[in-house]
């Protein structure tokens, strides 16, 4: 049986990913802070799965918790680092910025490096990181979120190069969603996808071991346009 871990499984994309991967026959390890939600998810899934509470802001402790979960499960071949926070920054507020940096940057890197080192030791594996189309934006409205996701996408590119250089069959998938209807998103932005449809596309990309997946597909064009947008126009738009 294939085994996978989802970090940030208690809500939104991570929750739906658990539902759809379990339906594909994966045995899952589910991580997040809200264990009551993880237990609720566990009860709703077919088969036997594992939960492990973690707060990725406590980076070293979270690494230990990931290692413990891997040992409990036995032979994990897929790790999805999905945990993330996104806040609008109407005024620049360090407390708000710090949470995004702690979760989306420090927490993300701490979990990814553990996953990568485990896969190198294991001889193969698949790391999936959830970034955002916002990684292509410089934004006055959400400067920290955009910068944190630029880190995620760039870091995953670097890790992918290392994986390739190692010669081992280790896949790194970068997922860049546009807008998906989850508790993180306020209001009804344009091209908002349902979480079920978005995750179904994500799962197809993951199972096909793609390097890069845009969710939904039309956001690939937006990302390409953002890459060639001059900074003066970017400042007007975002
Ligand atoms: N929704 C979108 O439109 C969209 C677009 C682009 C990218 N994304 C990215 O997709 C990912 C999932 O977002 P979502 O929309 O599904 O949001 P969500 O429903 O708010 O889910 C966020 C998940 O991250 C976990 N998390 C947050 N802080 C954590 C911490 N300190 N330690 C451990 N886990 C933590 C949460 O679990 P606990 O609170 O229980 O810890 C939850 O499971 C994020 O990385 C987000 O940036 C979302």
Image (cartoon, helix red, strand yellow):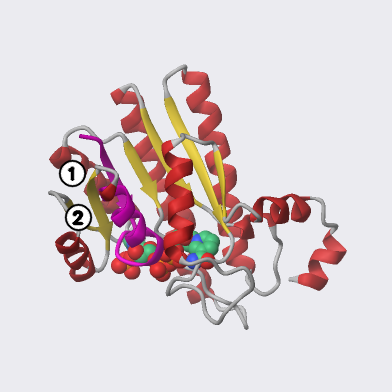
Disc 1 target residue: 68
Vertically, is 220 above or below 85?
A: above
Q: Is residue 9 magenta?
A: yes
Vertically, is 123 above or below 191?
A: above
| Residue ID at (45%, 43%) | 204
Write down the region rendered in magenta: 1-22
Label 2 CB less than 8 angstroms from ligand 1: no
| Residue ID at (53%, 41%) | 156
Please indicate, yes or no, whether residue 102 appears anywhere in the rendered image.
no
Foreground pick, 67 / 12: 12
| Residue 135 point in image, percent of width and height | 63, 55
| Marks 1 and 2 close (CB-CB < 8 Å) | yes
**Quadrant position of residue 54:** bottom left
| Residue ID at (29%, 56%) | 19
User: Which secondary structure, mark 1?
Assistant: helix
Q: Which mark is residue 52?
A: 2
């Amino acid at each position: 049986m294939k085994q996978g871990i989802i970090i940030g499984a208690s809500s939104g994309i991570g929750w739906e990913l658990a539902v759809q991967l379990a339906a594909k026959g994966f045995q899952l390890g589910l991580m997040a802070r809200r264990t009551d939600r993880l237990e609720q998810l566990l009860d709703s899934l077919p088969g036997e799965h594992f939960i492990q509470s973690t707060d990725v802001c406590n980076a070293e402790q979270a690494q230990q918790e990931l290692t413990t979960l891997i040992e409990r499960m036995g032979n994990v071949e897929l790790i999805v680092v999905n945990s993330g926070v996104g806040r609008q920054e109407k005024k620049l507020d360090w407390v708000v910025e710090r949470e995004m940096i702690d979760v989306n940057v420090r927490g993300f890197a701490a979990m990814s490096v553990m996953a990568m080192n485990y896969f190198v030791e294991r001889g193969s594996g698949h790391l999936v990181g959830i970034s955002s189309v916002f990684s292509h934006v410089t934004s006055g409205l959400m400067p920290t979120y955009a910068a944190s996701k630029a880190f995620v996408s760039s870091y995953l590119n670097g890790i992918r190069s290392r994986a390739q250089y190692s010669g081992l069959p280790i896949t790194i998938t970068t997922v860049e969603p546009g807008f998906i209807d989850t508790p993180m998103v306020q209001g009804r932005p344009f091209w908002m996808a349902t979480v079920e449809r978005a995750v179904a596309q994500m799962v197809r990309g993951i199972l096909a071991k793609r390097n890069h997946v845009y969710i939904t597909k039309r956001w690939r064009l937006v990302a390409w346009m953002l890459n060639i947008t001059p900074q003066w126009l970017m400042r007007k738009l975002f």
